[in-house]
Image (cartoon, rainbow, N blue to C red):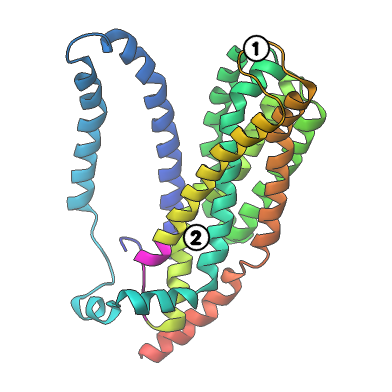
Amino acid sequence: RAVVEEDKRGKILAVSGLLVMLFSAIASMLLPTLMVSWGTEPGGWSRIALIYAVPMIVLGVIRFFTIKEQGVDAKQEEANKVGFKEGIKMLTQNKYVFILSIIIMLANLVQNIVSITGTYYFTYVMGNLGLLSLVGLLGLAAPFVLLLFPVAMRTIGAVGFVRIGLLLAAIANIVRFVFPTSLPVVLVTVMISGIGASTITMMNSFFILQCIDYGEYKLGKRVEGLPTAVNNFTAKVGSGIASVGVGFVMMATGYIQSNPQQTDGALLAIRSLYSLIPAVLCIIMLIVLYFYDIEKVLPGLKETHNQNKL
């Protein structure tokens, strides 16, 4: 609500996505050092918590008082009020919310499978867990790709940008499955596949706003809470399925944590979880994305909606 224009939304979300990932990486790298320094001292964890909490509170307060809603007045707010039953009915008439939610669920599934399996892969396939830190370092390159998002919106469209990312991620994962122990191949393909998946998860807010706009133009009322809730719920489902799924596959293929050497079946499962399965999921996302043609539909609906308001 602070930004009405779609192109500005894309720019803001791209820059904020970059900053979120960079500051999250810095915070993650800082935490172990703080734990070593203060973790065993009386009141140490309180100081650590304050180091993170105070700046976040200050930023939140600044944002609260400086960023204003636009294009919304009291009459419009009153007109947009819907009950839960009516909201559910309107939600079922917005197919794009559910298409996007499926894609978001799969994207979170991919990212969490790779994240969980990374430790096993570098321990048993690469033979050196310390090399996993290089993956985190190269992962810092992913946010900068999001700066291309505003340009992509004007040329190939937001959905086109995601398609390219997912296609590159699928190819990168397949290449990593073929060359599982080549460090340069593994590092480059992990970086590419991470960037591909982040094109949808980091731009999730932009796409859910599209779905909300579609619902408003088509049905006459702007329902924001339920589409966002469904989207967030399916993201959590994807994360949960990843945790359960990885554990089940590892157990079913004979993985034993105490064994320094794993069976061929367990090694194949680790390789598949870290490359082949994410590739398949990226391909499925590309197929589902074919039905997310909201960029073709939205301009016409918006024009009709604005004419009806006049």
Is 250 situated above or below 287? above
Q: What secondary structure is marked by label 1?
A: loop
Earlier residue among tags 1 and 2: 1
Is 43 situated above or below 68? above
Identify the residue at horizontal 61%, vertical 42% (top origin).
110
* Residue 81 locus on image (x, y percent): 27, 77
Quadrant position of residue 15: top left
Q: Nearer the viewer, residue 71 or 195?
A: 195
Identify the residue at horizontal 39%, vertical 83% (top origin).
220
Dot 1 alpha-carbon crowd within 10 angstroms: few under 14, some 14 to 19, many 20 or more: few
Quadrant position of residue 310: bottom left
* Residue 305 locus on image (x, y percent): 43, 85
Q: Which amino acid does label 1 sit on?
A: Asn
In the picture of the structure, the residue carrying the numbered disc 1 is 128
In the picture of the structure, the residue carrying the numbered disc 2 is 207
Say if the magenta span includes residue 225. Answer: yes
